[in-house]
Image: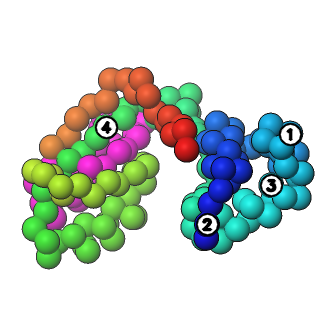
Amino acid sequence: MQLDQLHYAILNELQLNARMSNAEIGRRIGLTAPAVAERIKKMQEEGIIKSFTAAVEFSKLDYLQRVMIAIKLPPDNIPGFLKEAEKTEGITKIVHTTGEYCFFIDMVLKSTEELVPVLNKLRKFGETTTFSILAVPVDSKAVRL
């Protein structure tokens, strides 16, 4: 799919507010609502737009502990680790990286006590290091395309 300036303009608007109506996006970038809808549909079909999600403030829902868990794994343990992580409640993101750690896990919990059983499960696969997150000054930032 060949993207033009209008596709990028749509993506920029959606990054700022994914709930913005097609009509409002169209007014901002100079297209009709049906034209915006068709372009969004094509970008979804191509996998450029992966999903529309809600950003949840977990602390307002009594998830008061947020941690980042780094894990070192032997390559043979990766499939089992990923399967276990998929089943683990509270994990919001897993990032595969280069360097000392194979994966970083972002997790929310209601209390520190909930962390112990999770770490016990993960340590079956490799060595973990846990970081308590104090604040997230930039949680999600649009990238101007």
Along the polypeptide, which appears first: circle 3 or circle 2? Answer: 2
Q: Are discs 4 and 2 less than 8 Å apart at CB? A: no
Question: In the rendered image, which residue does mark 1 sit on?
Answer: 27
> Element under label 3?
helix
On the question of residue 120 being in view, the answer is no
- The disc placed on residue 67 is 4
Of the residues shown, which amino acid type is indicated by label 1?
Arg
Along the polypeptide, which appears first: circle 1 or circle 4? Answer: 1
As rendered, which of 29 and 100 lies closer to the eye?
A: 29
As rendered, which of 8 and 110 lies closer to the eye?
A: 8
Q: Which contiguous range is marked in magenta? A: 104-128
Of the residues shown, which amino acid type is indicated by label 4?
Val
Of the residues shown, which amino acid type is indicated by label 3?
Val
Along the horizontal axis of the image, is 109 left or right of 144?
left
Along the polypeptide, which appears first: circle 1 or circle 3? Answer: 1
Question: In the rendered image, which residue does mark 2 sit on?
Answer: 2
**Distance from Cα at disc 1 to Cα at disc 4:** 41 Å
